[in-house]
Every structure is written in C-alpha cells, then in structure tokens.
Image (cartoon, grey):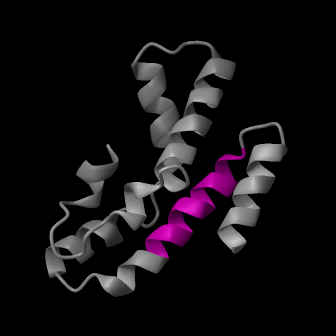
Amino acid sequence: MESFRLWLFLLESGRLDLDGFNALFRQHLRALLPRVRDARRRSSLERVQDMDWMGYILSALRNAGVSDQNEREQAAHDIAVYLLVQPGKLFVGYDPSASGPMEARFT
C-alpha cells in the first residue's frame, strides 16, 4: 500500500520525481531479493541495487531520438509506470527459478 501512495504522489505532483521513482524501483528490488536463492540470479539483482533506473530510461530515450525534454520525461514516466504498476511485471513477474539476469530484463 505504501508504494501505491508514493506512486500516486509521483503522479499527482505534476513533475517527474527521479528520486521517488528510483526509490520505488529499489523498494521492489528489496522485496524480490529474499525470494531468489540461485546465486547467479541473486548476483544479477544485487548488481542493480544502486542503479539510477530513471537516469538509464532517460538516457535510452535520448539515444532513441526523443530530444524534447518534456516529451522524454513524459515517456520516462510512462515507462516507469508500465514497469512498476500497470502491468508492473518487471519485479512481480520475475520468476526466481527461471528468469534471466535483471540487467537484461530491464534493458
């Protein structure tokens, strides 16, 4: 419920809160870590713990040719919501026994 409240705040604030979204990615990652027993998969998850998730998304959008900052921020917001909330499968859909490395899953 706490992550939903934070997401709602981020949505209503009218601006892209990079730190808030990064905190949500990290919160979901922390919740996933205890379920992963496989050493390689766990290592992959641990490597992305301090990642700047939103910075990566914004850079990827810039590299893809989205030059307008407002458009890039809106697209980054939409991507983050897609990954975390609707459908939100980046972490929730992660299968601790079958999913590949998180870096590949995210990128």
* Of the pair 46 and 13, the residue shown nearer to us: 13
Secondary structure character of the magenta stretch overall: helix
User: At x 80% / y 54%, what residue is drawn?
Assistant: 9
User: At x 21% / y 60%, what residue is drawn?
Assistant: 101
| Relative horizontal placement of residue 48, taking residue 31 as reference (left or right) | left
Q: Quadrant of the N terminus?
A: bottom right
| Relative horizontal placement of residue 12, taking residue 29 as reference (left or right) | right
Q: For the magenta stretch, what is the residue range?
A: 17-30
Question: Could you say where residue 5 lies in the image, as x and y percent from the top left?
Answer: 76, 64
Which quadrant of the view contains residue 35? bottom left
| Relative horizontal placement of residue 101, taking residue 60 as reference (left or right) | left
Q: Taking 70 as reference, is 36 above or below it?
A: below
* Of the pair 71 and 55, the residue shown nearer to us: 71
- Does residue 46 show up? yes
Question: Could you say where residue 47 lies in the image, as x and y percent from the top left?
Answer: 32, 66
Q: Indicate whether residue 18 is drawn in magenta.
A: yes
User: At x 44% / y 13%, what residue is drawn?
Assistant: 65
- Does residue 52 show up? no
Q: Taking 72 as reference, is 37 above or below it?
A: below
